[in-house]
Amino acid sequence: MRILTRQLYTYLYRRNIGHPHSRKFSSFNGRDELSMEEEAERKIGWFFKLLFAGTATMVAYQFFPYMGDNLLQQSVSLLQVKDPLFKRMGASRLSRFAIDDERRMKIVEMGGGQDLLNMLVAAKDDRTCKEALKALVAISASDEAARSLHQAGAISVIKSTPDSVEDAELMSYKSSLLKRFHELNLGTS
């Protein structure tokens, strides 16, 4: 068994122990071998880092394309679903996205204003009405968007929304929208 072990050891770890002179005349020494190994490890390490970064970028591109217009479009699409929960989620998203005039107009151009008005007409509970009115308030902060909502018939829809005794916030959204249209002289009659 010892002989077999010794033969396996010499086979796996071959060294020219019997020929020490051949190493003296070689221009290649142990330090060069170590530095080459370190350099190879460093290059392979950078390769793996770049491979990981590229993979992470591709995964992020696949899983997070929902920024910008895509997310706005999905939010507008949620308004067209029959379930009031999804409608409220879409309206809530739109109210958060309506932070500047450009985004407000983008929402109106995608049909979000008309969908919010349709949601308000079809709303059967106060929570759905409140979210729709909240989103309309956020969108109507832009003069152009408010004019587009007026052309879509927002005033008559808002006035036909039933008053809520329980939810004062709904009434404040409703009155602020009517006040906003009055400020723009869009006719609240």
Image (cartoon, helix red, strand yellow):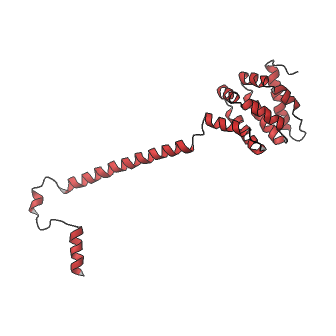
Image coords of residue 88 (percent x, y): 76, 41
Q: For this rendering, which residue is in front, 78 or 188? A: 78
Q: For this rendering, which residue is in front, 145 or 22? A: 145
Image coords of residue 116 (percent x, y): 76, 33
Q: Is residue 145 left or right of residue 61?
A: right
Of all residues shown, which one is farthest toward the top? 185
Tell me which residue sits at (10%, 60%) in the image.
22
Tell me which residue sits at (85%, 27%) in the image.
156
Above or below for 13 versus 182? below
Q: Is residue 173 left or right of residue 31?
A: right
Residue 5: name its quadrant. bottom left
Image coords of residue 82 (percent x, y): 77, 42
Above or below for 122 versus 2? above
Residue 185: name its quadrant. top right
Q: Quadrant location of the C terminus?
A: top right
Image coords of residue 102 (percent x, y): 65, 26
Q: Is residue 164 left or right of residue 35?
A: right
Residue 93 visible from this viewpoint: no
Tell me which residue sits at (21%, 54%) in the image.
31
